Amino acid sequence: MKEIKPTNKTGNNPETEQEKEVLPSFFQTLKTSTSKPLPNREVLEYTIMHSAPVKTNTEGYRSMMKVDKRTAEDIKHRLPCITPSVQLKGNSKKLTDFRKETCWLMLDYDDVPPENIAALRQTARNIPFTMIFYIT
């Protein structure tokens, strides 16, 4: 009698197929309509925490918001775009381009007083589902 091996949700044998994590889509800039999935979490972390061009444009955007909002928006549109909750097929940012959900959630807290950052950081680090916590 033939032994039937269990299958995973894709219908393949889990012993022979290692399922890859579904990662968010990455757009070179906010205005770009084509994307690609992030290759790994390290690229995500590097992009949002260590990339010199991203840091320079983020700081430029913040400085310019106090002076000229139109120029600030131009700077903002040069920044990369990451779709934390979904992976797209790569052709657009429309719902029709949806490929898979990532099961990720991104929380963005604006205008947090500096004296509250330490407590917020500690709370986030104590949540087992927190993958990345960063301050731009």
Image: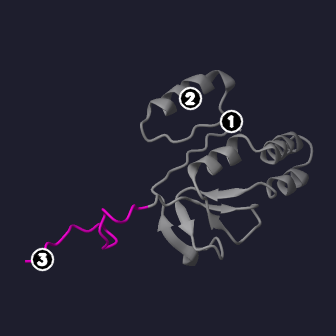
Residues at marks 3 and 1 touching, judged by CB atoms closer than 8 Å: no
Magenta-drawn stretch contains 11 = yes
Residue at 56% of width from left, 78% of height from top? 96
Residue 111's disc number:
1
Residue 52 in the figure: left or right of residue 126:
right
Tell me the CA gap for discs 2 and 3.
Answer: 54 Å
Measured as percent of width and height from the top left, residue 54 is found at: 78, 47
- Mark 2, residues whose alpha carbon is within 10 Å: few (<14), some, or many (≥20)? few
Q: Nearer the viewer, mark 3 or mark 1?
A: 3
Magenta-drawn stretch contains 92 = no
Q: Which amino acid type is shown beneath numbered disc 1? A: Asp
Residue 7's disc number:
none
Residue at 41% of width from left, 62% of height from top? 19
Residue pointed to by mark 2 = 121
Q: Earlier in the sequence, mark 3 or mark 1?
A: 3
Q: Which amino acid type is shown beneath numbered disc 3? A: Lys
Q: Which residues are magenta?
A: 1-19
Measured as percent of width and height from the top left, residue 50 is found at: 73, 40
Residue 80 in the figure: left or right of residue 67:
left
Badge 2 marks a residue whose secondary structure is helix
Q: Which amino acid type is shown beneath numbered disc 2? A: Arg
Q: Nearer the viewer, mark 2 or mark 3?
A: 3
Q: Where, by quadrant of the figure, is residue 77 drawn?
A: bottom right
| Predominant SS of the magenta segment | loop
